[in-house]
Image (spheres, grey):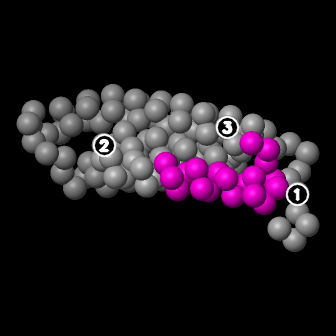
Amino acid sequence: MNEYRGGKFGFVSSHATNSFGLAMFSTLLFKDKGFTFFIFSWALLNSYSRIYLGVHYPGDILAGGLLGILLGWLVYWLYDRFINRMVTVIAKPHQQYDTRTIVFTGILSIVIILLSAKTLI
């Protein structure tokens, strides 16, 4: 794109890591087959665009995708442990998640994305 080629350091692809991390976390969160197919297709297409533009090699994308899947699973695991403790303290045992829990999940997701963004490192 406009004669741009990646810099000296391109391994692991941050686009692939973030895309697959989001895909894995949201898949585990929503547990819907249609959504899973859509979000992983989007992550794959987003990651492929890096190869198409010539800024990453396929190995960079593969390693980024695997790292993203691992981190997405890890964040979900931590989220699940924390949210289960919070729900048992806040809600009754068989009560559905309330609006506060949903808003907390959204804010937590945004904070994690911002903390892992390349611009803050």
Q: Is residue 40 left or right of residue 118?
A: left
Residue under label 2, please give it. Answer: 31
Q: Amino acid at mark 3?
A: Leu
Element under disc 2: loop
Q: Position of residue 116 (x, y in %)?
A: 61, 44
Which residue is denoted by mark 1 in the rendering?
A: 5
Between 82 and 15, the one nearer to me in the picture:
15
Q: Secondary structure at mark 3?
A: helix
Residue at 61%, 39% in the rendered image: 65
Dot 1 falls on a residue whose secondary structure is loop
Residue with the mark numbered 3: 62
Give the mark nearest the N terminus, 2 or 1.
1
Residue 109 percent location from the top left of the image = 45, 49
- Residues at marks 3 and 1, CA–CA distance in whole angstroms: 19 Å
Magenta-colored span:
40-58
In three-dimensional space, the C-alpha distance between marks 2 and 1, rounded to whole angstroms, equals 38 Å
Q: Magenta residues: mostly which secondary structure?
A: helix
In the image, what residue occupies the spot 49% across and 48% down?
40
Q: Is residue 52 visible?
A: yes
- Residue at position x 43%, y 55% in the image: 38
